[in-house]
Amino acid sequence: MDAPTTTSGENGIAGGGGWFTPHKAPPTPPPGGDQETAEGRRPAVVRPVGRPTREGTARPTSDAPATRPTPAAPVEQPAQAPPSSPPIPEPAAAFEPSRPTAASTEPERVPPQRSAPPIAEEASPDALAVRGTMAEIGPVADKVTSYFYALLFVRHPELRPMFPPAMDTQRDRLLKALLTAAEHIDNKPVLVEYLQNLGRGHRKYGTRPEHYPAVGECLIGALSKYASDIWNPEIEAAWVRAYTTISQVMIDAAAADELRAPAWWHAEIVSHDLRTPDVAVVTVRPDQPYPFLAGQYTSVETPWWPRVWRHYSFASAPRSDGLLTFHVKAVPAGWVSNALVHRARPGDVIRLGPPTGSMTVDHTTDSGLLCLGGGTGIAPIKALVEDVAEHGLRRQVEVFYGARTDHDLYDIDTMLRLQQSHPWLSVRAIIDQLAHLQLPDAIREYGPWNEYDAYVSGPPGMIRSGVHALRDIGIPSNRIRHDSVEELIVVGN
């Protein structure tokens, strides 16, 4: 359960049959219907490429030649870095699409989400019991994790094949995802959406309703051992109710999804473009129609690392030829990213999980789009621009494209071509090493953004600072969309 995503028709507690016994799956589906980045310093601004600002600041016109931007003169007072939000536990490898955590061997981009609404001020008794347990086990989290997996694999060895052979890639994602969901049990709007997406995503691991009780029993076993000083029947009952709610939401979502979509898609690589020594643009052809929306992401598994999945955003809007494109950056110890960048070739077949994420464009409004993309986080931003263009609306789209060096602006030529084709689009390059003005200051300098919806994609640190700056200049949380799971939960707090 790595960054949030999943839902269900019933949010109540499963009844009958003992601990964690799931309800019967719903008979009908509901109506309707990674990109990896290593976190680095926030980029500083470079001279913009685009139209004059509303306040008269001069910048090149959209029909200027598509040349690389040059650095702007440094400013005297660079912005103070906003405080970083505490990291939030991420999902598991076999029971959920894996996401990046601070301790993960392969940092990975987290799913796009809309900033969460505030949690109710009055916590329920169950929420208080859960949070008290979390505080108790915090100092011995590693031991809790080890004991949880030991219990799971000893008591239920049939579940071991669902996890990667090397558990160092698994880390504590599953347990932390469960704990995170339980801790936010009162925040139903965020929690349900998170869990529904997880339930749908877990289908690709072969997760079935009968697996959830085993996980729940081992969770209770690990918590009761390491929170023994405070553990009592009331706390245990609170955890049983919380986990039963969590598992039922995921089970219902998976059952509904099973009636309308496969658990995974096979996709053949048709082109592999190495843009830099560690960034590749990979295009694939799914074996059957793959419906998705611009701004969403999916999980990817390679043939070289079975049962190891990483998330990547789609780098284009849906195409008539059905092809899908991803931007992949190889990171140190990144099994999936290194395989896709350095080993994959046309003809190789990978697997794709279901599309997910809510960093999509609302085409019922004409609000402008303020898009902040750092590193390979430019991929979903490019998809959003194409989506706006295909809908034929002349709504303003302002893109800040960030990178550590000029060399890392691997897709700047594409963005400049889009700018030349669409007068409503403005692209500003942001390079960390060539100027002193950092991203939050750039946002403030080029505003105001009162009539814009904001989209943020990139490394967790950039997302945190970007969201902080956007809220600081008055953009409400419900108009900020981003691809960080941890940020989704943090904002909910």
Image (cartoon, helix red, strand yellow):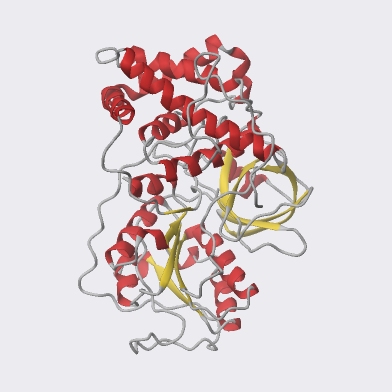
Q: Position of residue 107 (x, y in %)?
A: 47, 43
Residue at 59% x, 24% y is 165
Q: Position of residue 401 (x, y in %)?
A: 46, 68
Q: Can you say whether 284 is above or below 195 in the image? A: below
As drawn, which residue projects farthest toward the left? 77
For residue 454, what is the image quadrant? bottom left
Residue at 61% x, 75% y is 389
* Quadrant location of the C terminus in the rendered image: top left
Residue at 59% x, 21% y is 211
For residue 471, what is the image quadrant? bottom left
Q: Can you say whether 46 is above or below 256 in the image? A: below
Answer with left or right where residue 239 lies relative to residue 306.
left
As drawn, which residue projects farthest toward the top? 155
Closer-to-camera residue (412/426)? 426
Q: Can you say whether 76 is above or below 276 in the image? A: below
Closer-to-camera residue (33/380)? 33
Answer with left or right where residue 229 lies relative to residue 33.
left
Closer-to-camera residue (230/30)? 30
Closer-to-camera residue (20/274)? 20
Q: Position of residue 190 (x, y in %)?
A: 43, 45
Query: What is the number of callouts on the image?
Result: 0
Q: Is residue 105 visible?
A: yes
Q: Is residue 435 visible?
A: no
Q: Position of residue 432 (x, y in %)?
A: 37, 65
Residue at 42% x, 72% y is 452
